[in-house]
Image (cartoon, grey):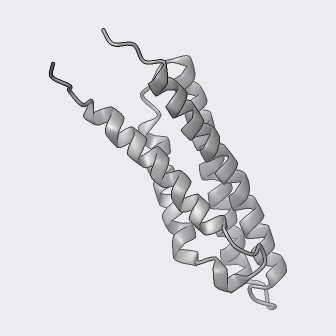
Amino acid sequence: MVVRVNLEKVVFGFFVLLAATLNFGYVIGEIDDVQLHNVYELYAAVAVNIIATILKFGDRTQIGAVHLATSLVASIQLIIAALVWIWASHVDPAGLTPTHMASVVSIAAGALLANIVSVILLVVETVSYRRR
């Protein structure tokens, strides 16, 4: 028996999981401690979530629509979190305060929840897949 790997599914699963793990890595730690939340990790989470969103556009199934919705939610929330960071760092005279950081991390945590739903959908879809 020869097992063939669907490269499209591998790439899709890779980006869904990478988006979730980058988001988790960014959110973990004290919510208001600027030292524990790296701006480059946030930007990487934004970029990977956008790529994952783009990969979800072609699927015309019901579960594909829910995948796209969760990915859009995560991407929008991470973009908002990055914009809050940029505003706090470059516009607000007080700079990036613990209050700003708490806002950025809490918004990114909402994106993490959407990413977790996306991973659960991916697992459910994989488990329910029937060989033809």
Q: Nearer the viewer, residue 92 or 115?
A: 115
**Residue drawn at (39%, 46%) of the image:** 14
**Residue drawn at (63%, 49%) of the image:** 74
**Please, is residue 110 above or below residue 60 in the view?**
below
Return the x and y of residue 19 as percentages of the image width and height. Answer: 51, 53
Q: Is residue 118 left or right of residue 85?
A: left
Return the x and y of residue 46 as percentages of the image width and height. Answer: 54, 60
Q: Residue furthest front?
A: 1
Q: Is residue 94 left or right of residue 119?
A: right
Return the x and y of residue 91 as percentages of the image width and height. Answer: 73, 83
**Residue drawn at (34%, 42%) of the image:** 11
Q: Nearer the viewer, residue 39 or 3?
A: 3
**Residue drawn at (74%, 60%) of the image:** 107
Q: Quadrant of residue 89?
A: bottom right
Q: Which corner quadrant holds the C terminus?
A: top left
Return the x and y of residue 28 as percentages of the image width and height. Answer: 66, 68
Q: Which corner quadrant holds the N terminus?
A: top left
